[in-house]
Amino acid sequence: MIEQTKTGIEGLDDILNGGIVKNSTTLVSGNPGAGKSILCLQYIYNGVEKYDENGIYLSFEEDESDLREAAESLGFENWQEHVDNGDIKVYDKQVLLRENDFTSSLDILLEELEDGDYDRLVLDSLAMFELFFENEKEKRTYLLKFTDILSDSGLTTLMTNEQGAVFPDTEIGLENYLTDGNIYLIQTPTDTGVNRYVWVAKMRKQNIETDIYPMEIDRGGIDVHQNASAFSMMSEEESPI
């Protein structure tokens, strides 16, 4: 029986047939504004609020105050309370980029893992994390080492990845193959705004629903609808499936 970690996100756990595989690393990819950071904030917040699972949020792009404002704007009103009492531990860019050295940042995290009791971790974003390394081989080596450390520490991890292409099949990077799961957030412009979709492309060790599902972002975060999308705005050649 595979142990799972529920995201607590309406509809997403159903697509995952229960949740994310425990102690795994899942890559959340999408173009700017697709909702990657929102999904991650929701994942960490739901862990504390719904499942008594503490979380660590590593942000290479935002200050701690920016994360708090983003969380509170989504209706996560107890975010700062959980940070203050240690249920959510935030390391922002001021801390992680202080030494401009991956080993120093890793030492900070390892010390926390030894002293704390955490179940979930977010790394936002992988693109900034990878700036520590000079070449593809070094990046691959350290990413594998890092994900192994997180798994051995009992953490179920989400990592965000910036994607320039609208459709995921046109831009597949090395990190997609080094992680246990791949979740794509897709947004397509319309005359009246933006249509949003989620596609769980891979999740090792478990069966998943691989259709593309519509989603919305509102107060409360992401809500995934259960009716699979026909993706009618795309031509057959453009379809990511």
Image: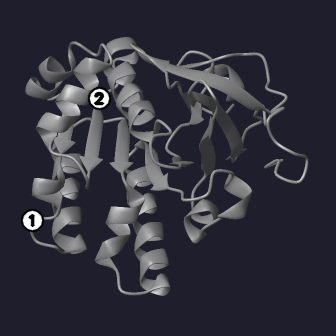
Instruction: Tell us which disc is closer to us: 1 or 2.
Output: 1
Disc 1 to disc 2, how far (Cα)? 25 Å
Considering the numbered disc 1 on the image, is that residue within a helix, a strand or a loop? loop
Query: Neighbour class for label 2 at 10 Å: few (<14), some, many (≥20)?
Result: many
Tell which residue pokes out farthest to the right in this image.
236
Q: Nearer the viewer, residue 123 or 226?
A: 226
Tell which residue pokes out farthest to the front in this image.
191
Q: Quadrant of residue 224?
A: top right
Give the mark nearer the N terminus: 1 vs 2: 2
Residue 222 seen in this snapshot: no
Name the residue beneath numbered marker 1: 98
Instruction: Name the residue at 80% across, 33% down.
Output: 231
Residue 58 seen in this snapshot: yes
Res. 54 mark = 2
Measuring from the top left, give residue 153's x and y in whole percent. 36, 49
Q: How is the image coloured?
A: one colour
- Give the residue type that dot 2 points to: Asn
Measuring from the top left, give residue 10's x and y in whole percent. 56, 15
Marks 1 & 2, CB-CB < 8 Å contact = no
Query: Neighbour class for label 1 at 10 Å: few (<14), some, many (≥20)?
Result: few
Q: In the rendered image, which quarter contains the N terminus?
A: top right
Q: Quadrant of residue 218?
A: top left
- Give the residue type that dot 1 points to: Arg
Measuring from the top left, give residue 17's x and y in whole percent. 70, 25
Considering the numbered disc 2 on the image, is that residue within a helix, a strand or a loop? loop
Relative height, residue 143 to residue 204 (above, below): below
Q: Nearer the viewer, residue 27 or 143?
A: 27
Instruction: Name the residue at 22% across, 57% down.
Output: 110
Tell me: 83 left or right of 150.
left
Relative height, residue 218 to residue 70 (above, below): above
